[in-house]
Image: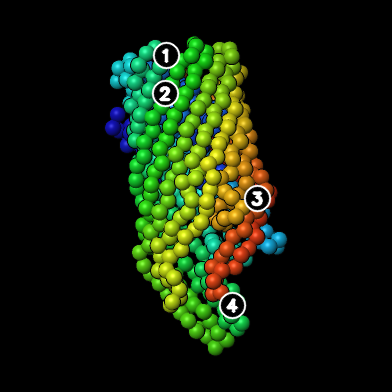
Amino acid sequence: MKKIFAVGFAAAMAVAGSSAFGAGFGIYEASSRGNGMAGALVGGTGDATAVYYNPAALTDVTNVSVSAGVTFINPFCDVTVNHQPQTKMNPGWFTAPNFYLSVPLTDRIVVGYGNYSEFGLGTKYGQHWAMAGDTIDTTIIQYTFNPVLAVKLTDWWSVAAGARISYIDFENHKRPMWGPSAGVLTANAKSRLHGDDINAGWLVASNFKITDKLKLGVMYRSRINHVIKGDFNVNGGIYSPLGLAVPMYAHSPAKAKLTLPQSLTVGLNYDITDDWRVGVTAMAIGWRSVDKINFKIPAVVAGQKAGYVQKLNWKDTFRLGFGTEYDINDWLTARCGYTYDQDPTTEKYGTTMLPSGDRHIVHTGLGFNLAEGLRLDIGYSLVLMERGSRYITVRDLTGGTRYHFNCRNSYSHLISAQLTYNF
């Protein structure tokens, strides 16, 4: 068992580059089958991926189960600033890997483990675009390491609890002072803010077998409070026609507080026939906890106030998904689904680190039974983001300039693959 755990953990971490984003900066692409079903597997999965969707349903998995996969994500959008076209936001492809293991200890007790990404984002703009003072490129990479214990209390009711150990890595590049300022003076400086942190939260879950064909799942995930610590670097200065007038060089420790939100998930799964299954899931997400990010960094110009607060004032949101799958024959299953993912951002406050707009996601997928107990799942999802605009203040030599930032034609491609083996 230790060997299986180590190999799966190493494989998942090896393919992990960075992660893209759902609404807010949540990631919900936890398995290829789940992607094809719009995440509507809260009532039960029949394998180790229940560690993510509802660990209480692990009591239905009577054999050792192992599952590993990855989702590749490519987000982009067209950008205008003060109604002027800018470089397209296109950070490239990102990866969201996952690994799951479940082991029955008795006919009523199951232990499980999963590692996956719950949060993350990736945005990238041109080096000299109009709002380079807010961001040039930003990444948030997060991994959750999740041991769980599931217990069947009765023939129709199971419960589970687990720890969520969260590792997060944040990196931001921008030009905090750039462009013409104060008449003949020109500012040109680049900064890099990078740090990471590890902290823990928890989850509890229940699973109810209402009938042989209908199952209900409920799960709560707690907040996780991160204090991201790292380094801040800035190089450049303010230039006059005669050369460098005011240097801006700094290297210092830095930190920022970030609270990952709590969530409550409820889902139903129903077997219409032996070959046709449907599911629905609803999630309430407490993005209100992400009200601001308080950056503690040194001043880049003498006399300037050190550090700054990135106001966000996000609102709580919900996410709703419907999915279905049909066994075409003994070896092939087809899936499809739809997800509505509400945007937590507000128009008054914003940042170019995260494009705004509600998400509409269309899912498709196929499952292949390769051998007894061995299944390959593949999936494709198209994320369509509603057009969104924000008013954003970027600090400069005059104290700050307010911009109108607009995203349109925003969408993402998600391609996933997963191997699952039930011993």
Residue 102: percent from the left, percent from the top? 36, 26
Residue 193: percent from the left, percent from the top? 43, 62
Q: Dot 3, how many residues are within 10 Å of its Cα: few (below 14), some (14-19), or many (20+)?
A: some
| Tag 1 near tag 3, CB within 8 Å | no
**Closest to the observer: 332 or 65?**
65
Query: Looking at the image, can residue 250 be seen?
Result: yes
Q: Dot 4, how many residues are within 10 Å of its Cα: few (below 14), some (14-19), or many (20+)?
A: some
Residue at left offset 52%, top offset 85%: 243
| Tag 2 near tag 3, CB within 8 Å | no
Alpha-carbon span between mark 4 and mark 3: 29 Å
- Residue bearing mark 3: 388
Residue 269's place in the image compared with 73, above or below, is above
Indicate the amino acid at tag 3. Answer: Gly
Q: Is residue 365 left or right of residue 302?
A: right
Alpha-carbon span between mark 2 and mark 3: 37 Å
- Say which label, 2 or 4, has the lower sequence index: 4
- Residue bearing mark 4: 181
Q: Secondary structure at mark 2?
A: strand
Q: Which mark is residue 288?
A: none
Alpha-carbon span between mark 2 and mark 4: 59 Å
Indicate the amino acid at tag 2. Answer: Ser
- Residue bearing mark 1: 156
Residue at left offset 40%, top offset 17%: 157
- Say which label, 2 or 1, has the lower sequence index: 1
